[in-house]
């Protein structure tokens, strides 16, 4: 059996009353449990047995910054596969909307078609908020993430991705989506426009305090320069953005097609992964170029 590298030393969390059996979010962030490769491969995420299956990452779009895709309508349309200036599907929160990339094989195994709306649930202990989640309540309706699934072979299996550059739902945008005649997720009082019907990518992540058992002895690099120091520093220990190791469960919410059609129109036309028609297959082979 392989031995841990001598430079990797356990933090002895038991000294602080933190047992290996405590699988809460904060404790998993702070402790340092050392396993051999064999032990690690035999381990499992505590939520996997209940249907949590995917790592959910929310990176910044490579050629965008913050709200790039949503400050103008044409960019929102271009930003992803679900842009539609006519909004033939009035479920669309705007002329574009948030989506999640899923490997087609994973999605099919979950009964999710390309273009379907899906629910995305993260660790229920503290997401999308702390406390009891009551289905049908205003808070839960607002914050539970609902968005479209996009088949994408460029994402590895068991990994999923949403770009973070989009305005999330608010109480006002949800009210607008449900009450506005055009179905826009736009606050009827302020004009705030969301790109999600419900929730946002941040429903599955959270701001967090970087916890550590080594506040006084933690070796770190200073914010500016190459100076190596140790102990507390605001940039090390203060609240930061969402961790990227969110683990989520997907469940189908609605068909991608407009009632009574079940399939999203590009799927029916043979333009989407796993549904390619003959012309699309020729295009992918480069047959349109001579």
Image: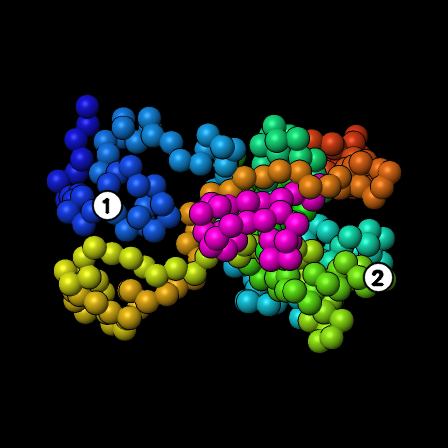
Question: What residue appears at the point 79 percent right and 30 percent down from the top-left corner?
Answer: 278
Q: Residue furthest bottom?
A: 190
Q: Main secondary structure of the magenta part?
A: loop
Question: What residue appears at the point 39 percent right and 59 percent down from the top-left corner?
Answer: 208
Give the percent coordinates (x, y) of residue 223. 28, 70
Q: 71 and 147: which one is in front?
A: 147
Give the percent coordinates (x, y) of residue 6. 13, 40
Asked whether residue 192 is drawn in magenta, I would say: no
Sooner in the amino-acid sequence: mark 1 or mark 2: 1
**Residue for badge 2:** 182
Residue 22 sits in which quadrant?
A: top left
Q: Nearer the viewer, mark 1 or mark 2?
A: 1
Which range of residues does the magenta coloring cover?
116-141
Say whether residue 113 is visible.
yes
**Residue for badge 1:** 18
The residues tagged by marks 1 and 2 sit, at their Cα atoms, a distance apart of 52 Å
Give the percent coordinates (x, y) of residue 45. 40, 35
Element under disc 2:
loop
10 Å neighbourhood of mark 2: few (<14), some, or many (≥20)? some
Question: What residue appears at the point 60 percent right and 53 percent down from the top-left corner?
Answer: 140
Location of the N terminus by quadrant is: top left
Q: 92 and 83: which one is in front?
A: 92
10 Å neighbourhood of mark 1: few (<14), some, or many (≥20)? some
Does 162 appear above or below 233? Answer: above
- Which colouring convention does the figure follow? rainbow
Element under disc 1:
loop
Residue 66 sits in which quadrant?
A: bottom right
53 relative to 285 in the view: left or right: left
Give the percent coordinates (x, y) of residue 93. 73, 58
């Amino acid at each position: 059996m392989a031995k841990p590298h001598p430079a990797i030393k356990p933090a002895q969390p038991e000294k602080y009353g933190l047992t290996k059996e405590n699988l809460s979010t904060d404790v998993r962030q702070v402790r340092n449990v050392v396993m051999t490769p064999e032990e690690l491969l035999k381990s499992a995420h505590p939520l996997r047995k209940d249907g949590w299956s995917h790592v959910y990452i929310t990176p910044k779009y490579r050629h965008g910054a913050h709200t790039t895709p949503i400050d103008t309508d044409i960019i929102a349309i271009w930003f992803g596969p679900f842009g539609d200036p006519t909004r033939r599907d009035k479920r669309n929160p705007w002329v574009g909307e948030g989506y999640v990339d899923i490997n087609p094989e994973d999605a099919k195994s979950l009964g999710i078609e390309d273009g379907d709306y899906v629910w995305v649930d993260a660790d229920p202990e503290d997401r999308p908020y702390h406390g009891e989640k009551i289905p049908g309540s205003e808070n839960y309706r607002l914050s539970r993430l609902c968005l479209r699934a996009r088949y994408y072979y460029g994402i590895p299996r068991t990994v999923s991705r949403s770009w973070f550059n989009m305005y999330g739902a608010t109480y006002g945008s949800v009210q607008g989506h449900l009450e506005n005649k055009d179905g826009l997720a736009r606050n009827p009082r302020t004009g705030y426009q969301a790109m999600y019907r419900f929730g946002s990518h941040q429903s599955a992540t959270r701001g967090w305090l970087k916890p550590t058992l080594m506040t006084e002895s933690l070796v770190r690099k200073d914010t500016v320069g190459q100076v190596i120091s140790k102990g507390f520093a605001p940039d090390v220990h203060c609240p930061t953005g969402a961790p990227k190791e969110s683990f989520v469960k997907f469940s189908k919410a609605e068909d991608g097609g407009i009632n009574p059609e079940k399939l999203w129109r590009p799927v029916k036309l043979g333009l989407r992964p796993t549904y390619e028609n003959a012309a699309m297959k020729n295009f992918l082979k480069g047959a349109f170029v001579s």
